[in-house]
Amino acid sequence: QVQLVESGGGTVQAGGSLRLSCVASGQIEAIRALGWYRDTHTPGKDRELIATFTTDGDTKYADFVKGRFIISMDPAKNTVYLQMNNLNVADTGEYLCKSTGWIDYWGHGTQVTVSS
């Protein structure tokens, strides 16, 4: 199993920045990618991909965060980060960390609220 613990969420004004962290533990060797997703808890709307980082070093971003968010990984700390800059109200939501491998695992999430 893989355990994921997110931190770094909070409330920030539009235009501000936050950095999220996700620490992975357990069967680290089984992880092929770590990523961030957002859940707005809107009926009928699935969690949406924000950014992913593979163990090969490849990154992928949702179009609406390109140029504003940066995903990075510190292998020594088993941690993936999401630096979020120039936040806007539409970025509000619960941000969850997901590990992809033989089995996918999710963290419990951290809330990000952007006020106007």
Image: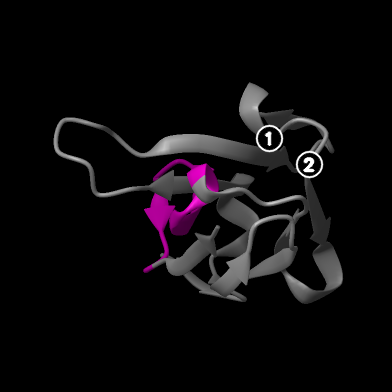
Give the residue type that dot 2 points to: Arg
**SS at mark 1 in the image:** helix
Spot occupied by residue 78 in the image (x, y as percentages of width and height): 72, 69
Give the residue type that dot 1 points to: Val
Spot occupied by residue 109 in the image (x, y as percentages of width and height): 42, 66
Would you say the residues marked 2 and 1 are in contact, meaning their CB atoms lie under 8 Å apart? Answer: yes
Does the magenta portion include 92? yes
What residue span does the magenta drawing correspond to? 90-108
**SS at mark 2 in the image:** loop
Residue extending furthest toward the top? 63
Write the residue at 83% across / 34% down: 67
Residue with the mark numbered 1? 65
Residue 15 shown left or right of residue 114 in the figure = right
Does the magenta portion include 28? no
Q: Which mark is residue 68?
A: 2
Q: Quadrant of the C terminus?
A: bottom right
Residue extending furthest toward the left? 43
